[in-house]
Amino acid sequence: MADSDSSLSPSNLGSNVEKYQGERSSGWSEIDEWGPEKVLQVYDPDTGMTGVLVIDNTSTGPGKGGIRFADSVTPTEVFRLARTMTWKCASAGLPFGGAKGGIIANPSKVNQVEWVKSFAKMIRPYCPSQYIAATDVGTTELDMAVFAHEIGDMQACTGKPQELGGIPHELGTTGYGVSIALRTTLDFLKDVKRKGFKASRPLLDLTYSLDIKRNDIKVVIQGFGNVGSFTAKFLNDLDIRVVGVSDVSGFVFDENGLNIPQLMIDMKDKSKLSDLLVDNQHHQQQYSYDILDKDEIFNVDSDIFIPAALTGVINDNTAHQLLKHNVKIIVEGANIPTTPSADDYLVDNNVLIIPDFLANSGGVIGSFVEYQGRTEKEAFDLIEYKITNNVKRALYNSLSSTDKEGDTSKLNVRKVAMETAKQIVYRAMLLRKGAISVAREAYARKERVIY
Ligand code: NAD
């Protein structure tokens, strides 16, 4: 096992060998003042398992982050996801730092249980003192059961099955949080108008253009897995209309609004949307679904776009399509779905973006509740409380930076929320160093985070 702060030393890289070696030859250029503290590349010759663990910053607590299991995993991707966790845990006021694990293979093409055990064995010295795992793309509560047993400590991961005292992400904690983030944003826009806040011209335009009843707003969701499907369910519970959902196999759309509870029933025991076509043929469903090409999601009019699938899907190609089709708000359910240049372009064009580290923190807040041995109900209550307050605070902080009369500046929630997260981590780093008076002074100057 290699353990290096500044370089990666891959030995056996499986199917991802070329990408990985490309990263190695170009050097590890991601280190900055925040981290990463540790980058481990692990290889188990007994099973062939190759993986990466990045512990980004532990000043606020042991690094928290899921294990991604996919053949597309690279150290750079794991690092970026770990960094997102650093900001996410700090923003949510949790006593965790940022980290992420990655196992490099298609889980259906290897012995998944053996590889998860193997990964656990290799990173055991860091678990749970510096790294606490969870599920991510390609891993489920069953993997967490295997992982915790292999480490020999139930505190080694969260998202475990209920039988092990877990609060599985499969209950929809992240999707619930995304729906709360959107509700909070809509309430904020209503407040700006109703209370007559001084706001910049672009924000007022946005407020007026969304001045419609909640169930007249049109939402589309990319991804109908854990995050996407539960986001749809909880938005439906809030009476917010979902007109389209897509996944890797296609796109289901109805401009009058999809019947989400029915779609969820029809999707039971199916792995992708296109499987609905088989039941269409056998008349086994109440509804007959049209399945469009998955990328048609970028070609329909909507007010709100929720990416809940992959990294980098909102990019230079798709950003202008979203704009053309009237998207006014993006709530990031997926991790790092927007490329930096697309982010600039959309913000410049007055699209309000609620960033991933605020919007999709429901999973890690639920994890914290599990870590404390508390209940599912407490998890959902804390997610609602924290996400409402954190999104509200970020929106109002953004508003106060653009409240001059005639101001044409845009509302950049990501930038403002990132500043807050950095202040929290910076103070924690100072405290760790023992620079208590400096940290106190820095702390006194800044507002409190909601704990
Ligand atoms: P998942 O594997 O359950 O679902 C992913 C979905 O994306 C699937 O429906 C898949 O078909 C779809 N998809 C894949 N490629 C697509 C494409 N090209 N176009 C449209 N859809 C496509 O994963 P998940 O757990 O729902 O995670 C989704 C995203 O949310 C990831 O970025 C993940 O890191 C992030 N996230 C997840 C959680 C969680 O608790 N699960 C928490 C925070 C962030």
Image: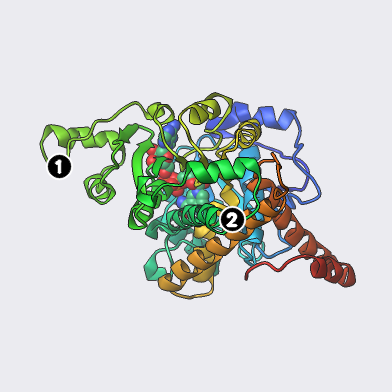
Report the amino acid beneath label 2.
Gly
**On the rendering, which quadrant does ligand 1 occupy?**
top left
Report the amino acid beneath label 1.
Gln
Looking at the image, residue 265 sits to the left or right of residue 351; the answer is: left
Measured from the top left, where is residue 333 in percent x and y? 49, 47
Q: Nearer the viewer, mark 1 or mark 2?
A: 2
Measured from the top left, where is residue 276 in percent x and y? 23, 37
Circle 1 sits in a helix, a strand or a loop, which is it?
Answer: loop
Residue visible at 39% across and 30% down in the picture: 300
Nearer the N terminus, badge 1 or badge 2? Answer: 2
Looking at the image, residue 421 sits to the left or right of residue 67; the answer is: right
The residue lying toward the viewer, choosing from 295 and 126, is 295
Q: In the displayed structure, would residue 280 be above or below residue 51?
A: above
Residue named by callout 1: 285
Circle 2 sits in a helix, a strand or a loop, which is it?
Answer: loop
Q: In the displayed structure, would residue 185 be above or below residue 109?
A: below
State whether residue 197 appears in this view: yes
Q: CA distance from mark 1 to mark 2?
A: 49 Å
Residue visible at 65% across and 36% down in the picture: 11
Residue visible at 54% across and 29% down in the picture: 319
Residue named by callout 2: 196
